[in-house]
Image: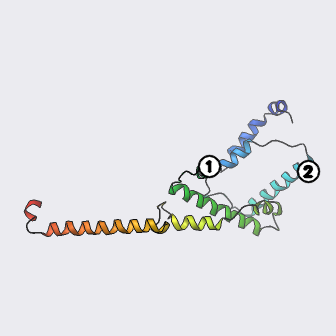
Amino acid sequence: MNPRTLRVLGYNKVLEKVAEQCAFSGGAEMARGLLPSDDLTTVQEWLDETSEAYKLLEQKTDIGFGGARDVRGALEKAERGAMLMPMDLLEIKNTLIRSRSLRNTLTRLEQTVPRLADIAYGIEPCDHVISEIGRCINDRAEVADNASSELARVRQGLRQAQERLLSTLDRLVQSSSVQPYLQ
């Protein structure tokens, strides 16, 4: 369809309504970019996928994208070699976990939703990335001591220095020559 026809039909308004229903910012962006097709085969494939999705949502009401975030900005930073903050990594991990879960659900239901399962097979589980982020970043978005041997060594040194400082302060507080000044 040409742009004038789409404008006359108010197609952008329809797309905006669809985008408003999306739970995920990436999905909303994709919805706003949809264009109709005049190819009967393509239209039939889209209708079949939509029918499967509708059937799936009727049968399994717990399917969703809860926990997934739009991590494209963090991925762009990583591609440029920029450092990611622990919260960025935690969001990536949680999004990958949610994606893996969705993939597993859809592929397990392949007999019921074969088209959606085919799409889901294209989702890389990224178990190694999930595992490595989990090893290095805890659920409070803190870098774990064992994230690297150097970090573990530095933190051990800091703990020892803190213990020595507290021990020295305790000796000073207990010292009879210093107690009159502490009063």
Neighbourhood count class around disc 1 (C-alpha, 10 Å): few under 14, some 14–19, many 20 upward? few
Colouring: rainbow
Q: Position of residue 13 (x, y in %)?
A: 74, 36
Q: Is residue 183 visible?
A: no
Label 1 sits on residue = 76
Location of the N terminus by quadrant is top right
Compared with 113, 10 (above or below) is: above
Compared with 72, 163 (above or below) is: below
Helix, strand or loop status at disc 1: helix
Q: Nearer the viewer, mark 1 or mark 2?
A: 1
Q: Nearer the viewer, residue 94 or 5?
A: 94
Q: Is residue 30 left or right of residue 171?
A: right
Q: Nearer the viewer, residue 57 or 140?
A: 140
Q: Which mark is residue 45?
A: none
Label 2 sits on residue = 41
Task: Tell me how far mark 1 sits from mark 2, CA to CA.
Answer: 35 Å
Amino acid type at circle 2 is Thr
Q: Position of residue 174 (x, y in %)?
A: 14, 69
Amino acid type at circle 1 is Glu
Tell me the residue at 21%/67% (across/down). 168
Tell me the residue at 56%/64% (across/down). 133
Q: Is residue 150 visible?
A: yes
Q: Position of residue 67 (x, y in %)?
A: 60, 58
Contact check, label 1 and label 2, Cβ < 8 Å: no
